[in-house]
Amino acid sequence: MFAIGKNPHLVALALSGIGLVVSCAVVYRHTLDFKQHFIRRFEPTPMIRPQTAVEETPDEAIDPALIEAAVHHFAAPAQWLGHSLFVPDRYVICDWKPFPVKVTGSDQCFPKPDLYRRAAMIPDEWFEHNHLIKWGVKTVDEDPDHDGFSNWAEWLWKTDPNDANPHPPYHRELYLKKLIKVGSLKLIFEAYDQDSGKQSETTFQVNTVGPTHATQFLKVGDAIANSKWRIEKFKQQPKVTFGEAQEVSELEVRNTETGNFLALPLGKIVDMSERFANFVYKWPIGSSTEIQVKEGAEFTLLPKADERYKLVQINEVEAVIQSPAGEKIVIGMDRGS
């Protein structure tokens, strides 16, 4: 006789077989009724209109322009208006090898490393917006609108590189090459005698520094001998430092030729030599013209020969000029760009 307690595994196997047969029967039954169930589930429900009187209203007029605009909108293909889709960083080809623009270029690859750095500073979006080749490093020095200014200058001054008007200012292409000194006049304001307290009666001791070492005793309005300078004003002002008064007075002198003013601080040597600025003018792009201007003199920049600039001041690293509109502009050294 079959003992259930002694053969539990056979009982479990039998029950599993019975369950499998029942499950197969149920699945088969549902597959037979699937088509009818699917049709009934997704069959649209008929709309029942309410049995109420509906007041008819006249049709509203439709603007034909709206219909035409809608048709044009759906007929036009979609456009990507943002940044280039799936476009990586910009690369340039040098010695048959790709180099990313975001890194510093080598002198061996580019004779002008500054050209490479300027190319990296301009964002890709600017090239794309102005329809320029963004993977060419030399694009920054090109002039597509032929106004004499490079794409680099157009980007700096936020002008359109494809439109010659407006364009960057012409002084943008002016650079200081060097300072030239003519003569060797050096003066020192040594002392002053002010017994009466009136500036007009004060006597000033001005010495020439050099082999001659001449001493002059002058008053306001007197010309300094062997020079083009004249005393215009005396500024007396003590300076208190750590409880002790220090003299910081100075003479204000004016160049009788140029009208420029210069200060002679008390006890300090000042170089009064004539100074000239040796400029380099790089307009139009690709050219290089040297212009020598005396401090205080006027000059012009082509192609505007009727507009006059003035060299106001100059030192070893920069010059200050005055534009035709009266604006003071700082001109830096030529960096070879």
Image (spheres, rainbow, N blue to C red):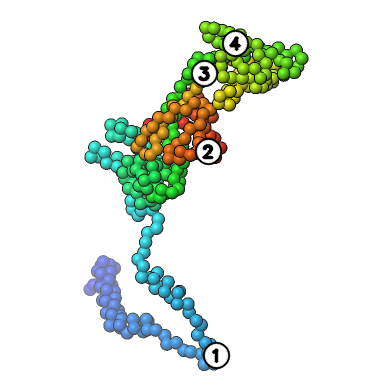
Of badges 4 and 2, nearer the viewer stands: 2
- Dot 2 falls on a residue whose secondary structure is loop
User: What label sits on residue 253 in the rendered view?
Assistant: none
Rendered location of residue 235, percent (x, y)? 67, 21
Residue drawn at (56%, 7%), measured in percent from left and top? 213
- Position of the C terminus, as image quadrant, is top left
Amino acid of disc 4: Asn
Marks 4/1: CA–CA distance: 111 Å
Answer whether labels 3 and 1 touch (C-beta < 8 Å): no
User: What label sits on residue 55 in the rendered view?
Assistant: 1
Of badges 1 and 2, nearer the viewer stands: 2
| Residue that numbered label 4 is attached to | 207
- Dot 3 falls on a residue whose secondary structure is loop
Q: Earlier in the sequence, mark 3 or mark 1?
A: 1
Q: Earlier in the sequence, mark 4 or mark 1?
A: 1
Residue farthest along the right direction in this orientation: 196
| Residue that numbered label 3 is attached to | 273
Marks 4/2: CA–CA distance: 38 Å
Amino acid of disc 1: Glu
Of badges 3 and 1, nearer the viewer stands: 3
- Dot 1 falls on a residue whose secondary structure is loop
